[in-house]
Amino acid sequence: MTGRPWDQVAAEDLARLRNAHLLRERRIIEPVDATHVRWDGREYINFSSNNYLGLTHHHRLIAATRLATEKYGTGAGAAPLITGYGPAHASAERAIARWKGTQAAVILPSGYQANHAAIQTAAAIGRLGGNGVRFLVDKLAHASLIDAIRGTGEAMRVFPHNHVAKLQRLLEDAPAGQLQVVVTESIFSMDGDAADLPAIAELKQLHNFLLLLDEAHAAGIYGLHGNGLAAEMGVADAVDVTVMTLSKALGGIGGGVCASSVFCDALVNYGRAYLFSTSVPPTVAAAAEAAVAIVQDEPARRHRLRAISRHVRERIGRTKFGIPDGDSPIIPIVLGGERAALDAAQTLGSQGLLVMAVRPPTVARGSSRLRVTLCSEHTDAEVERLLGCVEKLA
């Protein structure tokens, strides 16, 4: 006896998601500039983008993209180990490595793939060592990291969010000779809080492990040169592998893995997410290199971003909405239920503010929220308009 038709199964579950206020649907949103979009014929101030420094519309990125297109064409045409690795890729990787203070870097088509390639490489190294590998992961680590670890089939233990004492106990109980890989974000994508990197760095003085740090939401914002939270905290030397994106503060698309020459060479050989993907277009690499230069040349962008982030957090913190400590531009307004989050997003939308509702499974059930994200290009008036509307919500 055969089962029900696949399309009937899918349609019924999609209906279930809709009734539970959990259905995800794409919408056509047209960018106007770094902080404004047009949707259904109406213009909104965009408080939902990861374009933290407003670089998507920066004239230097646009010029770099145009020049690279004219010189190299629109696509790489092949995987990097075939003919898809060209001068623009090599130049951008050198620039990123210098900026991050590592020996080498590897560019991939997305941050998701960069995390997969980095995890796959760590797993392969653990197997080669003969005693296997175990991944120790912060509970709030990004889905791409969790998916990557599960895909390796290797052991994984999840420790409570920022619970360094629990992480220490897991390290103390590690089987002799087994490679331990500690995985965390520096700035967490949904809560906007920071990892306790100094405490994790101290653990490296007691235990031998590989530290893999996802700096997707910190690169470009933190550090003397915008090179990340680990650099700002003075613990960059404790980080073995850094994963970053080119699609958030850097204003483009793609991801990067920054590490020693040995690890990057291993990734080129063991990272299936890299081996079996077509390279990013040369235009993407050229834009990434230009963005790294802008981050260093124009520090006022990240200074303003952190200043308005502190201001918004302080004001919202006076309301009933609890806001995590810090000054990251990711500000969660937790409302609880899915319907409440959708209604709040609609209320802000009626005021011309685009703030998306985030619901399970992206966040835990019962913690649906508005996820406000700030950009250095938001004007003071726009920020005050947001704050006034959020205070009314409270």
Image (cartoon, rainbow, N blue to C red):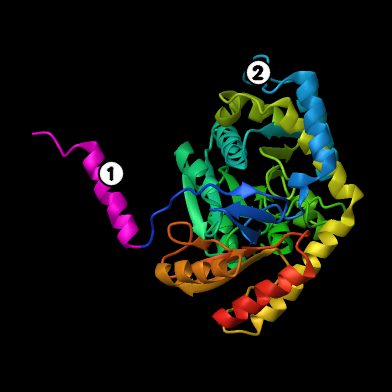
Q: Residue 260 at what x, y percent from top left?
A: 76, 36
* Relative to 171, 242 lies left or right: right
Which amino acid, mark 2? Leu
Q: Residue at x 57, y 61 (%)?
A: 190
Q: Which of marks 2 and 1 is in front?
A: 1
Which amino acid, mark 1? Ala
Q: What's the mark number on residue 10? A: 1
Q: Nearer the viewer, residue 18 or 186?
A: 18
Please rate how many residues cluster around mark 1, counting C-alpha atoms within 10 Å: few if below 14, some from 14 to 19, many from 20.
Answer: few
Q: Which of 263 and 379 is in front in this view?
A: 379
Q: Residue 369 at what x, y percent from top left?
A: 51, 68
**Secondary structure under the numbered disc 1 in the rendered image:** helix
- Quadrant location, the C terminus: bottom right
Q: Residue 383 at what x, y percent from top left?
A: 72, 70
**Span highlighted in magenta in the image:** 1-20
Would you place residue 12 above or below residue 257 in this image?
below
